[in-house]
Image: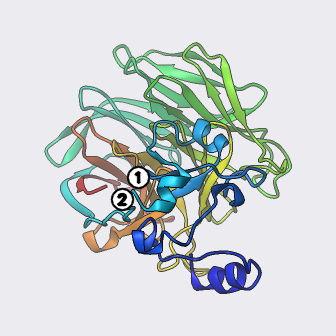
Amino acid sequence: MCDKCKDGVHLKIGKDHKILNINDIGKQEVSKDTIIFSEVKCDEHSNQACCLFCKTCNKLICLKCITKVHNGHEFIEEEDYNKGKVELKPKQKSEIKLEISKVYTTDLNNIHFIAVCSDGSMWLGDSLISKLQHVKLIGNRTEVITSLNTEIYGMAKTDSNNILVITTGETKLQLINTMTGEITDSKYDVKPLGPICVHVTSDHRVIIGAWSGGRLLPVTGRRVVVVMDQKGKQLEEYEHDNHNKPLFTYPSCVTTTSNGNICVVDILDDDGRGRVVVLSPGGDILDTYTGHPKVNTEEKPFEPRGILTTPSDNIIVTDVVNHLLHILTDQGQSITYYNLHDMGILLPFSIALSMTGTIYIGCANMRGSPDTTKAKLYELKYSEF
């Protein structure tokens, strides 16, 4: 906790609270300061008492947490925790590294969307000039295989290597056959809502951010994240929190972690300021990330655009105007941020994983840039996250 929380909440108001240094949790020398789990209320479910300590996440949890979030994690019971039988040490931070391996010049003005195919080719979308391209990477440029003039607002690759796209005025997603180029209606329809973004999970579920249309702000209609199975049947719908308040303002991009957490880029105003909302599979808010205090201020607010999950279940978010990557845990807590400007990468917008485990970042251009200004696509090697 920070000093403000410690002094203002846990010492002044919660006079019976016990405060330990995180480095001392579970050690024998502090084990005499017994903690009764049932007297601690769960952080995520305020009406539930804690019953176990999750060693994986380093926190006390309740029964609801076990089934919804921490399934398969390593737990410690109260007796062992207080006897100090298990020493809990914070994970040592490794040095996060990013390195540009290749740079490609595209035929687009902006790369708002990326979908990588199994053969290494990819689909790139520019929503401002209503262009969608299937390209292969040749030398330091992209070679266009197919070019479509269509308004595009979201894109994702399916398990069969075809491309789901969101086009204007349609409640149903379109499907592009990557072998033939044929465009047909898909099985996925969020009628009467309009789709905003789409993501396909590793177990082939389709997650769609949607809204009821109208003006972005003030919010007057519905803002929803819908989960569908492979056949287009709706499985879940996330719209309100436990207090019946809307979860989202404008869910513009979405990804998932291996344990089923849903991570949503939520745009909050017309200037592009936003946040990342991380939900458990049960719909509980695990965390809301609004940027890093060292780099995101009132003058330089967090402006998230692209989001993905790495194989190690870290969440990576592009912060377009600030030229940053934000790296989060699978529950949305900040690990660190990375300054791409220092690497020469400006206006990072879209982000995707390659077939070989590197990261692609598609960049935008400043408003008013000449039409001849071509967007850059970067391939980055990464380690330690």
Q: Which residue is mark 2?
A: 373
Q: Which residue is mark 1?
A: 109
Instruction: Determine whether, in the image, residue 51 is placed left or right of residue 201.
Output: right
Say which residue appears at 41% left-offset and 69% top-offset.
Answer: 28
From this view, report whether residue 151 is shown above or below residue 26: above
From this view, report whether residue 243 is shown above or below residue 336: above
Say which residue appears at 43% left-offset and 28% top-offset.
Answer: 202
Label number found at residue 202: none
- Label 2 environment density (alpha carbons within 10 Å; few <14, some 14–19, many ≥20): some
The kind of residue tagged 2 is: Thr
Say which residue appears at 31% left-offset and 48% top-offset.
Answer: 360
Q: Picture coordinates of residue 247 (x, y %)?
A: 73, 49
Chosen colour scheme: rainbow
Q: Nearer the viewer, residue 280 or 299?
A: 280
- Label 1 environment density (alpha carbons within 10 Å; few <14, some 14–19, many ≥20): many
Question: Looking at the image, can residue 53 be seen?
Answer: yes
Q: Picture coordinates of residue 10 (x, y %)?
A: 68, 78
Of labels 2 and 1, earlier in sequence is: 1
From this view, report whether residue 199 is shown above or below residue 313: above
The kind of residue tagged 1 is: Asn
In the picture, the quarter occupied by the N terminus is bottom right
Q: Nearer the viewer, residue 320 or 239?
A: 239
Question: Looking at the image, can residue 324 be seen?
Answer: no
In the picture, the quarter occupied by the C terminus is bottom left
Single out the residue that lies furthest toward the left. 139
Secondary structure under badge 1? Answer: loop
Instruction: Determine whether, in the image, residue 300 is placed left or right of residue 97.
Output: right
Secondary structure under badge 2? Answer: loop
Instruction: Determine whether, in the image, residue 97 is placed left or right of residue 250.
Output: left
Q: Nearer the viewer, residue 256 or 300?
A: 256
| Discs 2, 1 touching: Cβ within 8 Å | yes
